[in-house]
Amino acid sequence: MQNDWELDTGTAVADGQWRDDGFTIPGPGRERFHHALFAYALSGGILGALIGCVLYRGMYDPTGNNTVMVGLILAVISGLILLACAFCELRRPRITMNHELTLSRILL
């Protein structure tokens, strides 16, 4: 007997037996770590941090308000991480359904 918390991944056939239709959703502990996505996100974060340091040196105003500068630096870092992850998914599709991620969808 199947409880309400489990997902049904099979279909019933005429003789009452269950057959697997090949569609399974990974359960807890069965997901695999995406090493390439981690490496791309890390490299995007490092590159964003380096560009942020350059922006900090060029835009820092010791007498004024630097709120816009901090927001710009954070936007650059998060944008480069996002672009690195999208580029990784374009090269090695694993997350998107039916692998239909295109550059035009990313830019949109």
Image (cartoon, rainbow, N blue to C red):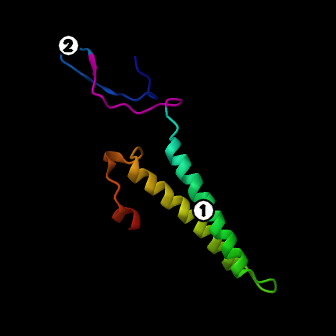
| Residue 25 lies in the magenta stretch | yes
Q: Is residue 79 above or below residue 30?
A: below
* Residue sitting nearer the eye, 57 or 94: 57
Residue type at mark 2?
Asp
Question: Residue 33's x, y, as percent?
Answer: 52, 38
Q: Is residue 52 above or below residue 20?
A: below
**Secondary structure under badge 1?**
helix
**Secondary structure under badge 2?**
loop
The label shown at residue 70 is none
The label shown at residue 47 is 1
Residue type at mark 1?
Leu
Q: Residue furthest bottom?
A: 63
Secondary structure mostly seen in the magenta stretch = loop
* Residue sitting nearer the eye, 40 or 31: 40
Residue position marked by numbered label 2 in the rendering: 15
Q: Residue furthest right?
A: 63
- Residue at 31% x, 52% y is 100
Q: Earlier in the sequence, mark 2 or mark 1?
A: 2
Q: Residue furthest left?
A: 14
Per the rendered image, the range of residues in magenta is 18-30
- Residue at 81% x, 86% y is 63
- Mark 1: few, some, or many residues within 10 Å (few <14, many ≥20)? some
- Residue at 26% x, 14% y is 17
